[in-house]
Image (cartoon, grey):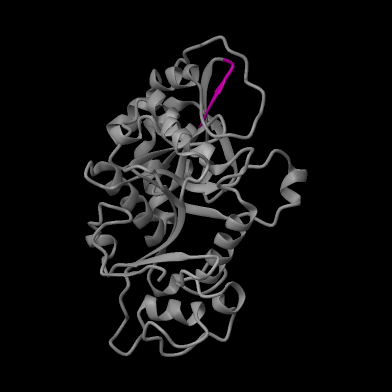
Amino acid sequence: MYACACWHKEDMAKQITRGIDQEFANAFRSSELYGLYKKYENELYIGVRNKYLNLYYYCASVAKVEFKKGCIKCMIAKKYLDGTGIASHINIDPGVICDNYAKIKENIEKRSTPEKNAQSKLILLNNANSKSNWFCVDIEWAKAFESRQQKSKVDFFARFDIVAISKSKPHEVALIELKYGRQAIGGRSGIYQHIENFYKYQSNGYFDAKNNSHKYEIANIVNSYKLLGIKVPEKLQNLQSDWNDSGQNVKFGFYVITLDNNSLTPRHSTPKQSMAAYLFKSKRWCCNKLSSGPNVEKKYGDVTSLRNKLQVNFLFSSQTLGNLKINDVIDGDYDDREFPK
Protein backbone atom coordinates (compact mmCIF):
# COMPACT_ATOMS: atom_id res chain seq x y z
CA MET A 1 0.00 0.00 0.00
CA TYR A 2 1.11 3.56 -0.70
CA ALA A 3 2.07 5.68 2.30
CA CYS A 4 1.28 9.28 1.32
CA ALA A 5 3.93 11.96 1.50
CA CYS A 6 2.53 14.84 3.58
CA TRP A 7 3.27 18.40 2.52
CA HIS A 8 1.34 20.20 5.29
CA LYS A 9 -0.66 22.48 3.02
CA GLU A 10 -4.36 23.27 3.35
CA ASP A 11 -6.55 22.91 0.30
CA MET A 12 -6.45 26.09 -1.77
CA ALA A 13 -9.58 28.17 -2.26
CA LYS A 14 -11.58 27.20 -5.30
CA GLN A 15 -11.07 29.19 -8.45
CA ILE A 16 -11.68 28.50 -12.11
CA THR A 17 -8.41 27.90 -13.89
CA ARG A 18 -6.28 24.99 -15.00
CA GLY A 19 -3.18 23.79 -13.28
CA ILE A 20 -1.53 22.57 -10.11
CA ASP A 21 1.10 24.07 -7.83
CA GLN A 22 4.65 22.98 -7.02
CA GLU A 23 3.69 21.12 -3.84
CA PHE A 24 1.07 19.07 -5.65
CA ALA A 25 3.59 18.29 -8.39
CA ASN A 26 6.24 17.25 -5.85
CA ALA A 27 3.80 14.96 -4.04
CA PHE A 28 2.63 13.35 -7.27
CA ARG A 29 6.16 12.82 -8.54
CA SER A 30 7.04 10.98 -5.32
CA SER A 31 3.99 8.71 -5.54
CA GLU A 32 3.64 5.21 -6.97
CA LEU A 33 1.16 6.57 -9.49
CA TYR A 34 3.82 8.72 -11.13
CA GLY A 35 6.01 5.64 -11.40
CA LEU A 36 3.14 3.89 -13.17
CA TYR A 37 2.81 6.79 -15.59
CA LYS A 38 6.54 6.84 -16.39
CA LYS A 39 6.56 3.08 -16.96
CA TYR A 40 3.61 3.24 -19.36
CA GLU A 41 3.86 6.76 -20.76
CA ASN A 42 3.59 5.31 -24.27
CA GLU A 43 -0.08 4.50 -23.49
CA LEU A 44 -1.05 6.90 -20.66
CA TYR A 45 -1.84 10.60 -20.86
CA ILE A 46 -2.05 13.15 -18.04
CA GLY A 47 -4.80 15.74 -18.33
CA VAL A 48 -4.40 18.84 -16.18
CA ARG A 49 -7.62 20.10 -14.64
CA ASN A 50 -8.71 22.66 -12.04
CA LYS A 51 -6.35 21.70 -9.21
CA TYR A 52 -6.47 18.01 -10.03
CA LEU A 53 -5.12 15.61 -12.66
CA ASN A 54 -6.74 12.93 -14.77
CA LEU A 55 -4.68 9.91 -15.75
CA TYR A 56 -6.11 8.59 -19.02
CA TYR A 57 -5.92 5.27 -20.82
CA TYR A 58 -7.78 5.17 -24.15
CA CYS A 59 -9.16 8.58 -23.08
CA ALA A 60 -10.93 6.96 -20.10
CA SER A 61 -9.96 8.06 -16.61
CA VAL A 62 -7.77 5.53 -14.84
CA ALA A 63 -7.62 7.92 -11.89
CA LYS A 64 -8.73 11.36 -10.86
CA VAL A 65 -5.76 12.55 -8.79
CA GLU A 66 -6.11 15.20 -6.09
CA PHE A 67 -3.83 16.72 -3.45
CA LYS A 68 -5.70 16.92 -0.15
CA LYS A 69 -4.31 17.62 3.30
CA GLY A 70 -0.80 17.03 2.04
CA CYS A 71 -1.54 13.66 0.44
CA ILE A 72 -2.20 12.27 -3.00
CA LYS A 73 -5.77 10.98 -3.23
CA CYS A 74 -7.36 9.05 -6.10
CA MET A 75 -10.81 8.31 -7.45
CA ILE A 76 -11.82 5.78 -10.10
CA ALA A 77 -15.02 4.59 -11.75
CA LYS A 78 -15.95 1.33 -10.03
CA LYS A 79 -16.68 -0.33 -13.39
CA TYR A 80 -13.04 0.09 -14.41
CA LEU A 81 -11.74 -1.45 -11.21
CA ASP A 82 -14.01 -4.47 -10.83
CA GLY A 83 -15.76 -4.72 -14.19
CA THR A 84 -19.23 -4.81 -12.61
CA GLY A 85 -20.69 -2.11 -14.82
CA ILE A 86 -21.38 0.20 -11.89
CA ALA A 87 -20.65 3.76 -13.01
CA SER A 88 -20.25 5.34 -9.57
CA HIS A 89 -16.82 6.59 -8.52
CA ILE A 90 -14.96 5.43 -5.45
CA ASN A 91 -12.00 6.78 -3.49
CA ILE A 92 -9.03 4.48 -3.67
CA ASP A 93 -5.40 4.30 -2.62
CA PRO A 94 -2.95 5.04 -5.47
CA GLY A 95 -1.20 1.76 -4.76
CA VAL A 96 -4.37 -0.21 -5.50
CA ILE A 97 -4.56 1.39 -8.93
CA CYS A 98 -0.94 0.46 -9.60
CA ASP A 99 -1.45 -3.11 -8.41
CA ASN A 100 -4.56 -3.55 -10.54
CA TYR A 101 -3.49 -1.61 -13.62
CA ALA A 102 -3.65 -4.62 -15.96
CA LYS A 103 -7.22 -5.39 -14.87
CA ILE A 104 -8.23 -1.71 -15.14
CA LYS A 105 -6.86 -1.59 -18.70
CA GLU A 106 -8.80 -4.71 -19.61
CA ASN A 107 -12.05 -3.27 -18.25
CA ILE A 108 -11.53 0.02 -20.09
CA GLU A 109 -10.79 -1.79 -23.35
CA LYS A 110 -14.07 -3.73 -23.06
CA ARG A 111 -15.99 -0.44 -22.97
CA SER A 112 -13.90 1.63 -25.34
CA THR A 113 -14.68 2.49 -28.96
CA PRO A 114 -12.47 2.65 -32.06
CA GLU A 115 -12.87 6.44 -32.00
CA LYS A 116 -11.56 6.79 -28.44
CA ASN A 117 -8.75 4.34 -29.14
CA ALA A 118 -7.76 6.30 -32.24
CA GLN A 119 -7.96 9.59 -30.34
CA SER A 120 -5.55 8.26 -27.73
CA LYS A 121 -3.15 6.82 -30.31
CA LEU A 122 -3.16 10.01 -32.38
CA ILE A 123 -2.16 12.26 -29.46
CA LEU A 124 0.47 9.85 -28.16
CA LEU A 125 2.03 9.43 -31.61
CA ASN A 126 2.05 13.20 -32.07
CA ASN A 127 3.63 14.03 -28.71
CA ALA A 128 6.25 11.30 -29.09
CA ASN A 129 7.32 12.84 -32.40
CA SER A 130 9.82 15.64 -31.75
CA LYS A 131 9.48 16.72 -35.39
CA SER A 132 5.72 17.29 -35.18
CA ASN A 133 4.72 20.90 -35.70
CA TRP A 134 2.16 20.60 -32.91
CA PHE A 135 1.91 19.56 -29.26
CA CYS A 136 -1.31 18.06 -27.87
CA VAL A 137 -1.78 19.87 -24.58
CA ASP A 138 -5.24 18.67 -23.59
CA ILE A 139 -7.93 16.10 -24.31
CA GLU A 140 -11.62 16.01 -23.43
CA TRP A 141 -11.56 19.76 -22.73
CA ALA A 142 -14.73 21.12 -21.14
CA LYS A 143 -15.52 24.66 -20.09
CA ALA A 144 -15.31 25.13 -16.33
CA PHE A 145 -17.84 27.32 -14.55
CA GLU A 146 -17.66 29.16 -11.24
CA SER A 147 -21.01 27.83 -10.03
CA ARG A 148 -24.05 25.84 -11.06
CA GLN A 149 -25.91 29.13 -11.35
CA GLN A 150 -23.40 30.42 -13.90
CA LYS A 151 -23.50 27.13 -15.80
CA SER A 152 -27.31 27.22 -15.93
CA LYS A 153 -27.16 30.55 -17.80
CA VAL A 154 -24.88 29.24 -20.56
CA ASP A 155 -25.94 26.99 -23.40
CA PHE A 156 -22.54 25.36 -23.85
CA PHE A 157 -21.69 21.92 -22.51
CA ALA A 158 -19.33 20.69 -25.22
CA ARG A 159 -16.13 18.72 -24.88
CA PHE A 160 -13.38 19.09 -27.45
CA ASP A 161 -11.51 15.87 -28.19
CA ILE A 162 -8.04 17.42 -28.56
CA VAL A 163 -6.44 20.81 -27.96
CA ALA A 164 -3.08 21.33 -29.70
CA ILE A 165 -0.57 24.20 -29.86
CA SER A 166 1.76 24.94 -32.72
CA LYS A 167 5.42 24.89 -31.75
CA SER A 168 6.39 27.71 -34.08
CA LYS A 169 5.69 31.36 -33.28
CA PRO A 170 3.19 32.85 -33.20
CA HIS A 171 1.82 29.88 -31.28
CA GLU A 172 -1.60 29.00 -32.65
CA VAL A 173 -4.20 26.77 -31.00
CA ALA A 174 -6.14 24.01 -32.74
CA LEU A 175 -9.47 22.89 -31.26
CA ILE A 176 -10.07 19.44 -32.69
CA GLU A 177 -12.97 17.01 -32.99
CA LEU A 178 -12.17 13.48 -34.12
CA LYS A 179 -14.53 11.32 -36.14
CA TYR A 180 -13.92 7.66 -36.91
CA GLY A 181 -15.78 5.99 -39.76
CA ARG A 182 -19.11 6.68 -41.44
CA GLN A 183 -21.23 5.79 -38.39
CA ALA A 184 -19.79 8.79 -36.50
CA ILE A 185 -21.00 11.44 -38.95
CA GLY A 186 -24.75 11.68 -38.21
CA GLY A 187 -26.79 11.52 -35.03
CA ARG A 188 -26.71 13.54 -31.82
CA SER A 189 -22.91 13.53 -31.57
CA GLY A 190 -22.32 13.92 -35.28
CA ILE A 191 -20.86 16.68 -37.40
CA TYR A 192 -23.81 19.09 -37.03
CA GLN A 193 -23.47 19.05 -33.23
CA HIS A 194 -19.73 19.71 -33.45
CA ILE A 195 -20.21 22.70 -35.73
CA GLU A 196 -22.86 24.04 -33.37
CA ASN A 197 -20.40 23.69 -30.48
CA PHE A 198 -17.69 25.50 -32.45
CA TYR A 199 -20.14 28.32 -33.14
CA LYS A 200 -21.13 28.70 -29.47
CA TYR A 201 -17.50 28.62 -28.35
CA GLN A 202 -16.55 31.36 -30.81
CA SER A 203 -19.65 33.46 -30.15
CA ASN A 204 -19.11 33.39 -26.39
CA GLY A 205 -15.48 34.42 -26.77
CA TYR A 206 -14.17 31.66 -24.53
CA PHE A 207 -10.68 31.71 -26.02
CA ASP A 208 -9.90 35.38 -25.37
CA ALA A 209 -12.27 36.12 -22.49
CA LYS A 210 -10.86 38.60 -19.97
CA ASN A 211 -11.49 36.20 -17.10
CA ASN A 212 -10.88 32.45 -17.14
CA SER A 213 -10.03 32.37 -20.83
CA HIS A 214 -9.17 29.11 -22.53
CA LYS A 215 -5.92 30.70 -23.66
CA TYR A 216 -4.97 31.30 -20.02
CA GLU A 217 -5.84 27.69 -19.17
CA ILE A 218 -3.53 26.37 -21.89
CA ALA A 219 -0.58 28.38 -20.57
CA ASN A 220 -1.29 27.01 -17.08
CA ILE A 221 -1.36 23.45 -18.40
CA VAL A 222 2.05 23.88 -20.02
CA ASN A 223 3.45 25.28 -16.77
CA SER A 224 1.96 22.35 -14.84
CA TYR A 225 3.54 19.85 -17.24
CA LYS A 226 6.91 21.45 -16.55
CA LEU A 227 6.34 21.10 -12.79
CA LEU A 228 5.42 17.45 -13.29
CA GLY A 229 8.54 16.72 -15.29
CA ILE A 230 6.54 15.95 -18.43
CA LYS A 231 8.54 16.80 -21.50
CA VAL A 232 7.38 20.06 -23.07
CA PRO A 233 8.80 21.01 -26.48
CA GLU A 234 11.63 23.52 -26.23
CA LYS A 235 9.74 26.03 -28.37
CA LEU A 236 6.87 26.03 -25.84
CA GLN A 237 8.95 26.52 -22.71
CA ASN A 238 8.07 30.23 -22.57
CA LEU A 239 4.53 30.03 -23.91
CA GLN A 240 3.02 32.59 -21.54
CA SER A 241 5.75 35.15 -22.27
CA ASP A 242 5.45 34.50 -26.01
CA TRP A 243 1.71 35.14 -25.86
CA ASN A 244 2.16 38.23 -23.70
CA ASP A 245 4.67 39.60 -26.20
CA SER A 246 2.30 38.95 -29.10
CA GLY A 247 -0.59 40.79 -27.45
CA GLN A 248 -4.15 39.53 -27.11
CA ASN A 249 -4.73 38.32 -30.65
CA VAL A 250 -3.54 34.73 -30.40
CA LYS A 251 -4.97 32.77 -33.32
CA PHE A 252 -7.11 29.70 -32.80
CA GLY A 253 -8.79 27.43 -35.34
CA PHE A 254 -11.39 24.68 -35.50
CA TYR A 255 -10.54 21.29 -37.00
CA VAL A 256 -12.44 18.11 -37.73
CA ILE A 257 -10.25 15.04 -38.29
CA THR A 258 -11.87 12.01 -39.88
CA LEU A 259 -10.11 8.65 -39.75
CA ASP A 260 -11.22 5.46 -41.50
CA ASN A 261 -12.49 7.57 -44.40
CA ASN A 262 -13.42 4.41 -46.27
CA SER A 263 -16.66 3.19 -47.84
CA LEU A 264 -18.05 -0.20 -46.88
CA THR A 265 -18.23 -1.12 -50.57
CA PRO A 266 -17.61 0.83 -53.81
CA ARG A 267 -21.35 1.55 -53.88
CA HIS A 268 -21.43 3.10 -50.41
CA SER A 269 -20.49 6.68 -49.49
CA THR A 270 -17.25 7.53 -47.73
CA PRO A 271 -17.46 9.41 -44.40
CA LYS A 272 -16.44 12.58 -46.26
CA GLN A 273 -19.34 12.21 -48.69
CA SER A 274 -21.71 11.53 -45.78
CA MET A 275 -20.39 14.57 -43.92
CA ALA A 276 -21.09 16.78 -46.93
CA ALA A 277 -24.73 15.77 -46.74
CA TYR A 278 -25.00 17.52 -43.36
CA LEU A 279 -22.66 20.43 -44.12
CA PHE A 280 -23.96 21.88 -47.38
CA LYS A 281 -27.17 22.97 -49.05
CA SER A 282 -26.03 21.55 -52.38
CA LYS A 283 -24.18 18.37 -53.33
CA ARG A 284 -20.44 18.88 -52.82
CA TRP A 285 -17.49 16.62 -52.08
CA CYS A 286 -19.11 14.03 -54.39
CA CYS A 287 -22.07 13.75 -52.02
CA ASN A 288 -24.78 11.43 -53.36
CA LYS A 289 -27.75 12.58 -51.29
CA LEU A 290 -28.36 15.53 -48.92
CA SER A 291 -29.52 14.87 -45.38
CA SER A 292 -33.15 15.58 -44.53
CA GLY A 293 -32.09 16.52 -41.00
CA PRO A 294 -30.37 19.64 -39.60
CA ASN A 295 -28.14 21.41 -42.13
CA VAL A 296 -25.00 23.32 -41.15
CA GLU A 297 -24.95 25.75 -44.06
CA LYS A 298 -28.57 26.74 -43.53
CA LYS A 299 -27.89 27.59 -39.87
CA TYR A 300 -24.23 28.66 -39.70
CA GLY A 301 -23.27 29.39 -43.30
CA ASP A 302 -20.62 27.70 -45.42
CA VAL A 303 -17.92 26.87 -42.87
CA THR A 304 -15.48 26.09 -45.69
CA SER A 305 -15.57 29.68 -46.98
CA LEU A 306 -13.17 32.43 -45.88
CA ARG A 307 -16.08 34.86 -46.12
CA ASN A 308 -18.02 33.01 -43.44
CA LYS A 309 -17.87 34.13 -39.80
CA LEU A 310 -17.29 30.54 -38.62
CA GLN A 311 -14.58 28.64 -40.48
CA VAL A 312 -13.64 25.00 -40.00
CA ASN A 313 -10.72 22.94 -41.33
CA PHE A 314 -11.35 19.33 -42.38
CA LEU A 315 -8.73 16.57 -42.52
CA PHE A 316 -9.42 13.08 -43.90
CA SER A 317 -7.40 9.87 -43.73
CA SER A 318 -8.19 6.33 -44.84
CA GLN A 319 -5.94 5.00 -42.06
CA THR A 320 -7.68 2.86 -39.44
CA LEU A 321 -6.82 2.03 -35.86
CA GLY A 322 -4.80 -0.98 -36.93
CA ASN A 323 -2.51 0.97 -39.26
CA LEU A 324 -2.67 4.47 -37.77
CA LYS A 325 0.73 6.14 -38.25
CA ILE A 326 -0.12 9.86 -38.36
CA ASN A 327 2.37 11.47 -35.98
CA ASP A 328 1.64 15.14 -36.62
CA VAL A 329 -1.91 15.86 -35.56
CA ILE A 330 -2.50 18.72 -38.03
CA ASP A 331 0.29 18.64 -40.61
CA GLY A 332 0.62 14.87 -40.84
CA ASP A 333 0.08 12.42 -43.68
CA TYR A 334 -3.60 12.96 -44.46
CA ASP A 335 -5.14 11.84 -47.76
CA ASP A 336 -7.35 14.86 -48.16
CA ARG A 337 -7.63 18.39 -46.74
CA GLU A 338 -10.47 20.85 -47.05
CA PHE A 339 -9.40 24.23 -45.69
CA PRO A 340 -11.52 27.40 -45.99
CA LYS A 341 -10.96 29.23 -49.24
- Location of the N terminus by quadrant is top left
Taking the spot 57% from the left edge, 69% from the top edge, the residue there is 188
Q: Is residue 185 left or right of residue 121?
A: right
* Residue 29 belongs to magenta span: no
* Residue 68 belongs to magenta span: yes
Q: Is residue 251 left or right of residue 213?
A: left
Of helix, strand and loop, which mostly describes the magenta segment?
A: strand
Taking the spot 24% from the left edge, 61% from the top edge, the residue there is 322
To which quarter of the image does residue 245 belong? top left
**Residue 9's spot in the image, x, y percent?**
58, 12
Q: Is any atom of residue 76 visible in this view? A: no
To which quarter of the image does residue 111 belong? bottom left
Please report the bounds of the magenta region as a residue range. 65-69
Residue lying at the far top of the rendered structure:
8
| Towards the viewer: 178 or 165 | 165
**Residue 85's spot in the image, x, y percent?**
53, 51
Position of 51 relative to 205 (above/below): above
Position of 246 relative to 110 (above/below): above
**Residue 79's spot in the image, x, y percent?**
51, 46
